[in-house]
Amino acid sequence: MEGVIDALTRNLLTRQKGFDWTVTEFVRVVDARLPPRVFYKHCPELQISPVATPSGVPVHLQLLGSDPRALAANAYQALSLGALSIDLNFGCPAKLVNRHDGGASLLRRPERVYAAVKAVFDAVGGQIPVTAKIRLGFSDRRLAIVCAQAAEAGGACQLVVHGRTRDEGYRPPAHWEWIGKIRHRAKIPVVANGDIWTLEDYWKARTLSGCDDVMLGRSALADPWLAPRIRHWQLTGERLPDTTWPMRARMLKEYAHLQRQHLPERIVVSLVKQWLAQMRQGNAEADRHFQRVKRITNLTDLLDALVINATTQPLSALTLEV
């Protein structure tokens, strides 16, 4: 989720009950130990205790790299700064990242997954957990189970599995049944990820994978009330109403308010449009609004256009607290 899930977004998404924990954008590790300012940039929550969003949801730090020594050095640096856990990214499908030997590129050789996890596990000395995220392989699924076992053998205590290979990118469908094959062979908890856009998707993903837990990524941006909707259904068996456009508009306006305190308005315009573009997934109304405002370049005009025909209630009155 590089470039879309920063601390302010984590703050907004976790104001409603639904998420048990969150993960930062990845900290890119190449061949050296990074200074504290890089960690604080990606995870400003490190500067407070506990390391959590303002609503108290824990924030876990993610590293992406391939050099075991560099990963170990940066894991120890993160530990010294107060990180709650280290998550290792072996799932990023971005071509630029893969060309530079990061993310899903390591899935072509399971022994490299093992070496990276083991180095980080040894570096933190059991003081904090080490977790990992993988895909079902790079070009095919032949090594999916072996890569999962390699991460477990290296010391990972939990595994998030995205139900596609790197070459499949984000093209549907996600193969939740393959996540189930990994879960049957793993001794550590496995979390299902990929194409969980609705309450029905959540149930299907759990049923086909057999996993107790799921991770939301793009879908949490597409519908910021999806996690609360899932949590409410878990607790009550009742289905909350669908997310409305006024709810989305107020979320975007609050996001812009927070971002403009630190960033130039032209950047905030781009960020708001970026989030609105994510909301278009499976939502025709959000798409219509995106088409209507996509050429607006002034932030005030953009925000005014977003709330046309939308309620003037504050965001807190529109959230679905459970």
Image (spheres, rainbow, N blue to C red):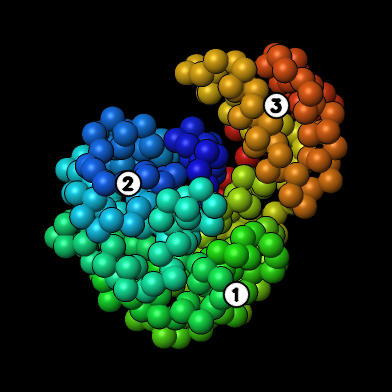
Say which of marks 2 and 1 sits in front. 2
Q: Nearer the viewer, residue 63 or 229?
A: 63
Residue at x 40%, y 68% (from the top left corner):
159
Q: Quadrant of residue 292?
A: top right
Q: Are marks 3 and 2 in contact (CB under 8 Å)?
A: no
Structural distance between the alpha carbons of marks 2 and 1 = 30 Å
Say which of marks 3 and 2 sits in front. 2
Q: Amino acid at mark 1?
A: Trp
Q: Where does label 1 land, which residue?
A: 176
Q: Residue furthest front?
A: 99
Structural distance between the alpha carbons of marks 1 and 3 = 39 Å
Structural distance between the alpha carbons of marks 3 and 2 = 44 Å
Q: Position of residue 144 (x, y in %)?
A: 47, 77
In the displayed structure image, the side of residue 31 where residue 200 appears, left or right: right
Q: Amino acid at mark 2?
A: Val
Q: Nearer the viewer, residue 119 or 233?
A: 119
Q: Where does label 3 land, which residue?
A: 313
Q: Where does label 2 land, which residue?
A: 29
For residue 143, above or below residue 103: below
Q: Secondary structure at mark 1?
A: helix
Q: Amino acid at mark 3?
A: Gln
Residue at x 37%, y 44% (from the top left corner):
27
Q: Position of residue 289 (x, y in %)?
A: 82, 33
Residue at x 45%, y 66% (from the top left corner):
134
